[in-house]
Amino acid sequence: GGVLYLSSLTSAEGLKLPETVGGHLDLRSLTSAEGLALPETVGGNLVLDSLESAKGLESLDYTGVRGTVWLPETFSNKDKEEVKKIKVEQEKKGINVNFRY
């Protein structure tokens, strides 16, 4: 395992991540989740705390995320409602994803 810090990356465009990240995946400067494809396994936390909105989060596959998905504290109530819907949809698929702000 290991930690993958891509903490200066602002866009997921053209980003190819490895199949497995044994530890945390730090994408703390990413402003949009659109176009992001998660690794099959993220052994730790997924840091997405610079996203400008929840747009794109609904299309991510959280199956392999073992830790917490960290989102911006600055998310609007509308974005937080969207995240709640995503959590419900994931649970229907048997995927327990933990979002925190």
Image (spheres, rainbow, N blue to C red):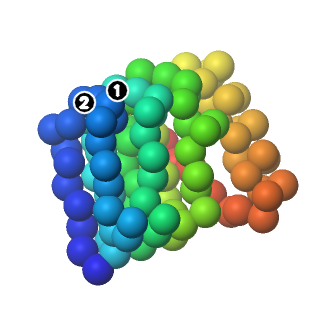
Q: Is residue 77 above or below residue 67?
A: above
Rendered image: mark on residue 80? none
Q: Mark 2 and mark 1: span between their CA atoms?
A: 6 Å
Q: Residue at x 43, y 60 (%)?
A: 39
- Amino acid at dot 1: Thr
Q: Return the x and y of residue 62 as percentages of the image width and height.
A: 58, 56
Q: Quadrant of residue 24?
A: bottom left
Q: Secondary structure at mark 1?
A: loop
CB atoms of marks 2 and 1 within 8 Å: yes
User: Element under label 2?
Assistant: loop
Q: Quadrant of the N terminus?
A: bottom left
Quickly name the residue at label 2. 10
Q: Quadrant of residue 17?
A: bottom left
Q: Which mark is residue 31?
A: 1
Q: Count up the numbered dots.
A: 2
* Residue in the picture at 31% in, 49% down: 16
Front-lying residue, 59 or 89 = 59
At which x and y percent is residue 13? 32, 31
Q: Earlier in the sequence, mark 2 or mark 1?
A: 2
Q: Residue at x 61, y 39 (%)?
A: 59
Q: Is residue 69 above or below residue 14?
A: below
Question: Label 2 is placed on what type of residue?
Answer: Thr
Residue 19 locus on image (x, y percent): 39, 66
In this rendered view, identify the residue nearer to me: 66 or 80: 66
User: Residue 75, can we see it?
Assistant: no
